[in-house]
């Protein structure tokens, strides 16, 4: 243990030397979202610029701070000033920023997002006082975007593995008591109390016990786990080590999606480091506790997020669920007691150990303590990953943090394909497991998809059910056949081929699938249909009775037209139309032949962004006469 | 039986001869040629002492495994929820038309294969399209052609 105290001290000294000295440091956000926005190219420019101007600077690759809409993010600490952040950095302006700010010492702080630190500077608010960040409480995301996820020393310098050290000095039962008192519930979606799960497994006698981290983040539109692993992989590993020590675990697995290659690389690197530092393996920190963690790459099956399917998949079988009980905590992987926890749950555990359960209980509301991360995406101004105390209202999340929508807000989908659609009348619903269930949705893993008036709820329900139907493992009939029929009904509604009794059929079939499916996948699959029917029935009726899609999304129910008064005849649309539906000589209003039009949207897009007139092509609905 | 390709031996023997090795083995095999050939299935079945149909049974359950040769470049259109509400499906339709193939297929000249992917987790930059390992963000139907022609 003494040896680790020495390491901790060294790491703190190094961290201080990096961040609190006169040294010039450039921090670049290099998580998947940053890379998708062009961070790799910006990195090359940074390196070239440093060389060109002979700047003595260190480049630190950090993870994602959560403000994905501002990616790529480049922070600079130089000339005695604190770390300052620049958003939406491009290949074109990266060099200018570095040259002006570092070399020429020009004050370009007005162009920045603010300085790091508790207070603002130079009349600018602090980085974390930005509207998107000021109402957030960063517990599990504390290090994200701040430290280098590839460097264990950064993590250790920021209290890393202090929770593990504390845990190893306690009896497992004491830890279970603390976790139970903290009141943390499974962040994967179902919200089962973590303390109870651990106790069940601890109390089951067995020579071998497994701990599995469920990182099979399959919800389309959710990326909390990806971001956390890419930005702070050691938080997850520390949580796993604490959990394993508590339940008496002998083997650990991280079951992760193959679609997240960067997360896998960072995890593997982190695993190599903990081994090197003696934090994983035999006799960890001289405590007598031994544990090893392996990565299991998922092979692409949404149902494997369900714990019994996940176990089957690790065992090398088709990932199909089985009935419970026995619960995995009693009989799981290879028939041995197994605890399966979500990434976020495990990532939170070290913080509870370090700061105590009372500290954790200050966040959230009775029965729903702590914080939760959400991926705030869709038609929202400020999209990204956020962390807020449970009990925060949807209104606060969408308007104060997310900045609202550009066009009028319509609804928000929580809980991914298993969740429901919540309309604007219910925006004051607090984010708790129970209140979300009451309005017909679920907490789920944390995807929040915001929709505005241009989103068709019928099309969205069709999308979710189509997804579920493709991902259904086929084991039980209600899910395999039932979801298929629901999709067929929804497709007909979207195509304007519905019959008057379709909505009743849809409703009764949905209830049937919900009541009779084997696992959570089928049991929750109809939620998107039932919740949209509950809050947006009128929109369904318009599709069925009038063949009208008010959001102008369902392609069979819309048509494209050229507004002759607006069209200047610039021929941009003519050049992109793949079917020759648009004709007309230059400088004269064009014609659009609706019989030839395949509604590919190319003319609409080009008219909005690239044409001389702009907005001369419009989409309109066809109401049944 | 015909002798199996010996180069598979190295991959096979890196894993213990047990059921749990099946999926990692198939993943490693696929990494060599970007698809699973009938010879690979035979080799894995032989090594683990199970039938080829058992191997196919597991492999075909998971969307990661493909059984036909992919193109030189792989195009994946993300159809996660955020991409869907921002027009992902229109992008896929446009690719289908431009390349004249359906998802899961490969162009006759073997240059491109087209795939749909449930979500790659870059939702804040939706809609996104992935070509090989490059993620293109905030794509629209006009940008599409520029993207895939740059790989030709």
Image (spheres, coloured by chain):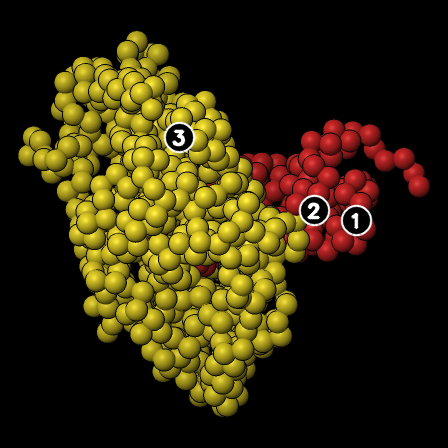
- Work out whether A605 lies above or below A164: below
Q: Colour of chain A?
A: yellow
Check if mark 2's residue and mark 1's residue have beta carbons within 8 Å. yes
- Residue found at x 49% / y 90%: A500
Q: Would you call the spot at circle 2 few (<14 residues within 10 Å), some (14-19), or many (20 or more)?
A: some
Q: Name the residue tied to disc 3.
A: A287
* Side of A515 where A35 appears, left or right: left
Q: Nearer the viewer, mark 1 or mark 3?
A: 3
Residue A279 visible, this angle? no
Where residue B19 is drawn, which disc sits there?
2
The answer to which of A192 and A142 lies nearer the viewer is: A192
Q: Name the residue tied to disc 1.
A: B50
Cα distance, mark 2 to mark 3? 34 Å
Quarter of the rendering containing residue A566: bottom left
The chain containing the residue under callout 1 comes to B
Q: Secondary structure at mark 1?
A: loop
* Side of B143 where A391 appears, left or right: left
């Amino acid at each position: 243990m003494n040896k680790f105290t020495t390491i901790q001290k060294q790491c703190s000294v190094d961290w201080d030397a990096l961040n609190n000295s006169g040294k010039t440091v450039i921090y670049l956000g290099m998580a998947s979202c940053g890379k998708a926005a062009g961070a790799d190219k910006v990195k090359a420019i940074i390196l070239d610029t440093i060389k060109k101007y002979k700047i003595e600077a260190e480049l630190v690759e950090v993870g994602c701070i959560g403000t994905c809409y501002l990616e790529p993010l480049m922070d600079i600490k130089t000339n005695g000033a604190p770390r300052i952040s620049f958003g939406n950095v491009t290949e074109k302006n990266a060099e200018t920023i570095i040259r002006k700010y570092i070399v020429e010492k020009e004050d370009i702080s007005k162009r920045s997002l603010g300085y790091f630190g508790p207070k603002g500077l130079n009349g600018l608010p602090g980085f974390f006082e930005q509207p998107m960040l000021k109402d957030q409480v960063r517990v599990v995301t504390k290090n994200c975007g701040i430290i280098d996820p590839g460097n264990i020393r950064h993590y250790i310098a920021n209290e890393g593995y202090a929770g593990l050290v504390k845990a190893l000095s306690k009896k497992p039962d004491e830890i279970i008591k603390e976790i139970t008192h903290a009141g943390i519930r499974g962040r994967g979606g179902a919200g089962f109390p973590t303390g109870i799960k651990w106790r069940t497994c601890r109390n089951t006698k067995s020579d071998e016990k497994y701990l599995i981290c469920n990182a099979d983040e399959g919800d389309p539109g959710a990326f909390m786990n990806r971001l956390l692993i890419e930005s702070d992989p050691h938080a997850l590993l520390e949580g796993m080590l604490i959990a394993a020590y508590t339940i008496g675990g002998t083997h650990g697995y991280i079951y992760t999606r193959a679609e997240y290659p960067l997360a896998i690389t960072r995890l593997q690197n982190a695993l190599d480091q903990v081994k090197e530092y003696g934090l994983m393996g035999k006799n960890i920190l001289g405590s007598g506790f031994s544990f090893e963690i392996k990565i299991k790459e998922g092979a692409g099956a949404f149902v494997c997020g369900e714990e019994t399917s996940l176990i089957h998949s690790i065992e090398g079988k088709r990932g199909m669920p089985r009935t419970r009980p026995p619960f995995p905590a009693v009989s799981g992987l290879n028939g041995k007691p197994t605890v399966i926890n979500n990434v976020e749950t495990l990532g939170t555990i070290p913080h509870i150990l370090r700061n105590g359960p009372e500290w954790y209980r200050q966040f959230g509301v009775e029965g729903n303590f702590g914080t939760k991360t959400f991926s705030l995406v869709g038609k929202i101004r400020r999209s990204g990953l956020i962390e807020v105390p449970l009990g925060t209202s949807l209104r606060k999340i969408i308007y104060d943090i997310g900045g609202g929508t550009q066009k009028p807000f319509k609804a928000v989908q929580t809980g991914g394909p298993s969740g429901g659609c919540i309309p604007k009348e219910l925006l004051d619903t607090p984010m708790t497991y129970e209140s979300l269930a009451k309005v017909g949705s679920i907490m789920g893993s944390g995807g929040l998809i915001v929709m505005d008036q241009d989103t068709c709820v019928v099309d969205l329900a069709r999308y979710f059910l189509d997804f579920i139907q493709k991902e259904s493992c086929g084991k039980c009939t209600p899910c395999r056949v039932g979801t298929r029929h629901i999709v067929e009904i929804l497709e007909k509604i979207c195509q304007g081929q519905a019959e008057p009794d379709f909505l009743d059929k849809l409703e009764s079939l949905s209830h049937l699938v919900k009541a009779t499916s084997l696992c959570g996948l089928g049991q929750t699959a109809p939620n998107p249909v039932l919740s949209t029917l509950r809050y947006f029935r009128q929109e369904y009726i318009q599709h069925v009775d009038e063949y009208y899609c008010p959001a102008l999304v369902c392609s069979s129910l819309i048509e494209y037209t050229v507004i002759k008064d607006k069209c200047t005849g610039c021929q941009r649309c003519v050049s992109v139309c793949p079917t020759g539906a648009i004709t007309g000589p230059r400088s004269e209003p064009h014609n659009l032949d609706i019989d030839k039009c395949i509604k590919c949207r190319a003319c609409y897009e080009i008219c909005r962004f690239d044409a001389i007139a702009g907005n001369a092509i419009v989409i309109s609905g066809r109401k049944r006469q | 039986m015909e002798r199996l390709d010996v180069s598979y031996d190295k991959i096979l023997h890196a894993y213990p001869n047990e059921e749990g090795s099946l999926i990692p083995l198939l993943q490693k095999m696929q990494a060599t040629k970007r698809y699973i050939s009938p010879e690979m299935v035979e080799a894995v079945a032989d090594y683990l002492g199970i039938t080829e149909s058992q191997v196919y049974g597991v492999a075909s359950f998971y969307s990661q495994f493909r059984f036909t040769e992919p193109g030189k470049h792989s195009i994946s259109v993300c159809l996660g929820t955020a991409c869907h509400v921002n027009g992902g499906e229109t992008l896929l339709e446009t690719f289908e038309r431009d390349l004249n193939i359906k998802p899961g297929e490969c162009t006759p000249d073997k240059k491109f294969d087209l795939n749909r992917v449930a979500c790659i987790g870059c939702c804040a930059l939706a809609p996104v399209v992935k070509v090989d390992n490059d993620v293109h963000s905030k794509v629209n139907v006009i940008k599409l052609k520029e993207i895939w022609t740059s790989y030709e």
